[in-house]
Amino acid sequence: MDEASGDAWAYEMAPQDASSALTGIVGANLRRLRTKRGLSLERLAKASGVSRAMLSQIELGQSTPTINVLWKIARALGVPFSALISDQSLGGTSLILAARAKVLTSHDGSFTSRALFPFDVPRTVEFYEITLAPLATEHADPHPPGTVENLVVTAGTLEMVVGAERHVLATGDAIMFDADVPHQYRNPTDRQVILYLVMTYIEKTG
């Protein structure tokens, strides 16, 4: 059985000459995410379709899995792919390089939102840098009940519409509001607006 299982692992392992730089990182992340969810190796193997033996090898830093295997594991754990390959320094420090930023944009590119937090685990607080082009408007649908937005304008003038309320914020002004209603970010000027936004979601109990 050992020999057969060894053959079965072949498709799960990256080639010998593959970069081993991620081996330890993936192993540590896998162990952390699996234990946080209270999953045994057996349960994760059943959920992911990756053998228990291979999962153990990955956690111990003895094997480098293929990208296919990483996708299967990420899907079973319910985490983004990046959660398994992100290099999380000891002490909880995460370096988010501008060159590798995760940036979301509107359909026309007039509104950009750059995540200033790692895509690793579900979190109740998110931090974004937002830019709004001259004379642009971004409509936002209501967020889940209990969601709060707190933002500060660092350049330009922002018109913030929250439900039936309208507020004009100059550079340096801040606002906090319940974001479970439709809201809009408007730039009434011919100068780009830059703001920083903290999104807080209600903690789920049970």
Image (cartoon, rainbow, N blue to C red):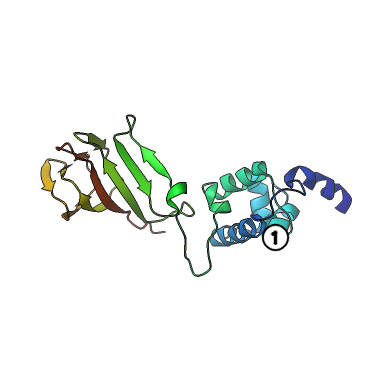
Q: Place residue 111 in its image quadrant.
A: top left
Q: From the viewer's perspective, tell me whether residue 20 is left or right of residue 76.
A: right
* Residue 205, image x, y percentages: 38, 59
How many neighbours does mark 1 have within 10 angstroms: few (below 14), some (14-19), or many (20 or more)? some
- Asked if residue 8 shows in the view, the reply is yes
Residue most extreme to the top: 108
* Residue 13, image x, y percentages: 74, 47
Secondary structure, mark 1, is: loop
Name the amino acid type tagged 1.
Gly
Q: Place residue 176 in its image quadrant.
A: bottom left
- The residue that disc 1 covers is 61
Quadrant where the image shows the C terminus: bottom left
From the viewer's side, name the closer residue of 56 and 134: 134
Q: Place residue 123 in its image quadrant.
A: bottom left
From the viewer's side, name the closer residue of 72 and 198: 198
* Residue 124, image x, y percentages: 37, 56
- Asked if residue 1 shows in the view, the reply is no
* Residue 6, image x, y percentages: 83, 50
| Residue at screen point 72% across, 48% down | 18
